[in-house]
Amino acid sequence: MKAWLSLFLLLCANFCLASENEVKEFSEKGVIVDIQNFFKDAKNTNTTNTKPKLQTSHIAFVNDKGVYSFLERDDQEKLLKPFKVGDHVEIKGKILEAGFLVEIGTIKNVEEKSTVDLKKYQELEGKAITLEGINKCQCGLKVGTLEHNCKLGHLHHLQTADGKIYHYLEEGKSSDMKIHFKKLKLDVVLFPGNFIKINDPAK
């Protein structure tokens, strides 16, 4: 238990000094995972959705340094389309550190398998916290110098006053227009990569 907590705090600390809109170069090797079924402590988060799954919102990139989500943009979707869960890849591009949010410049399969221990993330117990912020689709998020739009749909994220971006694990929370650009206070369980599972409904 203490080991997982130490890992969690270390991963959070890696980004605690970043300014809210800081974008940096990103060049990492790791593994593609199904983020909605990745964390054992976040099971049963999915809701029924007949729409085709988007790669940019349903998969994530994991390595020894952390868990990362992808910028939801049509060109990013095309870059990710040839890849599947379990692929070992190298990604070069940019990262918005306040959201562990990656913009892909290039992505390719690598023969050398990543040594990342996925279980250390999968079995990590989430941290219960309360968040207050604005529920925004990606075209409304503050993402620094990264380009963004809503051509893939109004997929929601929570952005807090300090500029940090949190990503819903619940599929339905990515498209509920009743909370579009609404101020929310949520009790959540926080996982690496700023992924969140909601404990209570929006207040």
Image: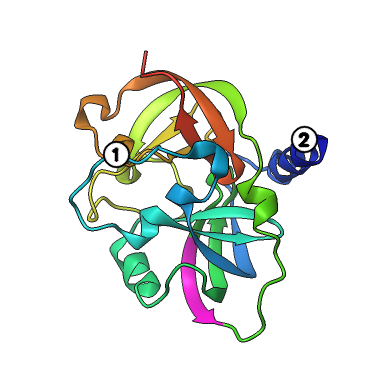
Closest to the observer, 141 or 40: 40
Give the residue number, with chain letter if any, for mark 1. 47
Compared with 18, 190 (above or below) is: above
Q: How many marks?
A: 2
In the rendered image, the residue lying farthest to the top is 203
| Magenta-span inclusion, residue 6 | no
> Magenta residues?
103-109
Amino acid type, residue under disc 1 in the picture: Thr
* Residue 18: numbered disc: none
**Which kind of residue does numbered mark 2 sit on?**
Met
Q: Is residue 83 left or right of residue 75?
A: right
Q: Quadrant of the C terminus?
A: top left
Label 2 environment density (alpha carbons within 10 Å; few <14, some 14–19, many ≥20): few
Q: Quadrant of the N terminus?
A: top right
Q: Residue at x 39, y 40 (%)?
A: 141
Residue at 47% x, 39% y: name it.
43
Please report the residue visible at 28 percent of the width from the left and 37 percent of the height from the top.
172
Left or right position of 51 against 59: left
Q: Is the C-beta separation of discs 2 and 1 under 8 Å?
A: no
Examine the image and state in which quarter residue 56 appears.
Answer: bottom left
How far across and how far down the image is residue 39, in percent?
A: 55, 45
In the foreground, 196 or 133: 196
Residue 1: give its label: 2
